[in-house]
Every structure is written in structure tokens, then in C-alpha cells.
Image (cartoon, rainbow, N blue to C red):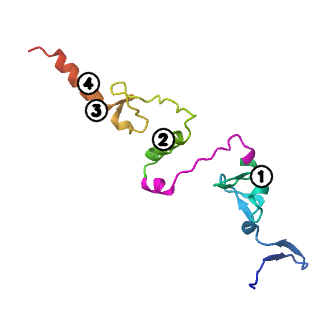
């Protein structure tokens, strides 16, 4: 049979003030990262604020306005160094897994091609239109008005 050691905190009078290291015996909130009051040894059926498949929430996060959690695989994060592109992938994945929610229509749409321009660098936009679409559109207009 193995030995188990539990760290004790002893004050100046020789009295035990703490058994175990709190950071080792209490769960950490999966949303905000603070230490919870839930023991790691507590069975999940008897926990308040436990999210199956994700982990433990602290009281504030559990009682907060939104308890919906959404996970993204690590590979997606590591393979997408551009934060804007990562945000677009996260949003797309969210709406694919939650069909009951409808995405908010972007206010940034190219009026020429109709594509979303939310994630386009400002240098490549004229207002909310693609610079390339604007140039192509200008060429078409010039060719229509040309007199031979």
C-alpha cells in the first residue's frame, strides 16, 4: 500500500491552519480561471456549476448571464495565426453547431459582388467595397461610355 502525503500549514503556535494546498484540492473555473469552492474529489453529480465535457464553473460564472460554452479545437487555433480569420472560423463553427441561432447580417458587404468584407484589410477597401471590384467596375463603366 502506497503512502499519501498531505501538506499541512502550521502557524507559529504549532496549530494546523490548513490541510493540503488549496490550489491542488479545489477546481479552477473553466471560464474565468479563478479557484472555485468545489473540491476536485467531489463527484460531478453533486456539483453545482459543472458543465459536462468542459469542467467546473465558479459561482459568479455559473450565475452570470451566459452559461453557454463553445469549444474550438486546438489545431484550429494553432493553424490560424491571423486573429481576424480565427474569429471568422469560430463564428462560422458556432453557427454550424447551433442552427437555431441566426448570424447577424454583416454591415460590411461589397455592393458590387455582394461578399462580406468584414475581415478584409482596410487598404483593400473603398468604403465597404473591395478595391478590386471598384476598379473592375470603373473599367466597365469607362468602356461603356467610350466613343469610337
Quick one: label 4 or label 2, which is nearer the N terminus? 2
Quick one: label 1 or label 4, which is nearer the N terminus? 1
Going 76% across and 66% down the picture, which residue do you hit? 41
Answer with the quarter of the image where residue 35 lies.
bottom right
Q: Nearer the viewer, mark 1 or mark 4?
A: 1
Give the residue at mark 4. Answer: 137
Give the residue at mark 1. Answer: 48
Proximity of marks 3 and 2: CB atoms separated by less than 8 Å:
no
CA–CA distance in space, label 4 to label 2? 30 Å
Lateral position of residue 23 relative to residue 112, left or right: right
The stretch drawn in magenta includes residue 67: yes
CA–CA distance in space, label 1 to label 2? 31 Å
- Which quadrant is home to the N terminus? bottom right
Proximity of marks 4 and 2: CB atoms separated by less than 8 Å:
no
Q: Nearer the viewer, mark 3 or mark 1?
A: 1
Residue 61, position in %: x, y? 71, 48
**Magenta segment, which residues?**
62-79
CA–CA distance in space, label 3 to label 2? 25 Å
Give the residue at mark 3. Answer: 132
Q: Number of labelled discs?
A: 4
Secondary structure beneath dot 3 equals helix
Answer with the quarter of the image where residue 3 lies.
bottom right
The disc label shown at residue 92, or none: 2
Lateral position of residue 58 relative to residue 102, left or right: right
Q: Nearer the viewer, residue 41 or 115?
A: 41
Going 78% across and 77% down the picture, which residue do you hit? 7
Quick one: label 3 or label 1, which is nearer the N terminus? 1
Q: Nearer the viewer, mark 3 or mark 2?
A: 2
Residue 5, position in %: x, y? 77, 80
CA–CA distance in space, label 3 to label 1? 55 Å
Determine whether 137 is above or below 35 in the image.
Answer: above
Q: Quick one: label 3, few (<14), some, or many (20+) residues within 10 Å?
A: few
Amino acid at each position: 500500500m502506497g503512502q499519501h502525503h498531505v501538506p499541512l500549514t502550521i502557524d507559529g503556535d504549532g496549530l494546523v491552519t490548513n490541510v493540503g494546498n488549496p490550489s491542488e484540492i479545489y477546481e479552477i473555473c473553466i471560464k474565468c480561471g479563478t479557484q472555485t469552492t468545489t473540491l476536485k474529489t467531489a463527484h460531478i453529480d453533486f456539483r453545482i456549476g459543472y458543465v459536462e465535457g468542459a469542467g467546473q464553473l465558479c459561482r459568479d460564472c455559473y450565475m452570470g448571464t451566459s452559461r453557454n460554452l463553445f469549444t474550438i479545437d486546438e489545431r484550429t487555433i494553432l493553424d490560424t495565426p491571423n486573429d481576424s480569420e480565427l474569429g471568422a472560423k469560430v463564428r462560422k463553427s458556432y453557427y454550424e453547431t447551433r442552427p437555431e441561432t441566426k448570424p447577424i447580417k454583416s454591415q460590411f458587404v461589397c455592393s458590387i459582388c455582394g461578399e462580406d468584407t468584414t475581415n478584409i484589410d482596410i487598404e483593400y477597401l473603398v468604403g465597404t467595397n473591395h478595391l478590386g471590384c471598384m476598379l473592375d467596375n470603373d473599367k466597365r463603366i469607362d468602356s461603356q461610355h467610350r466613343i469610337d
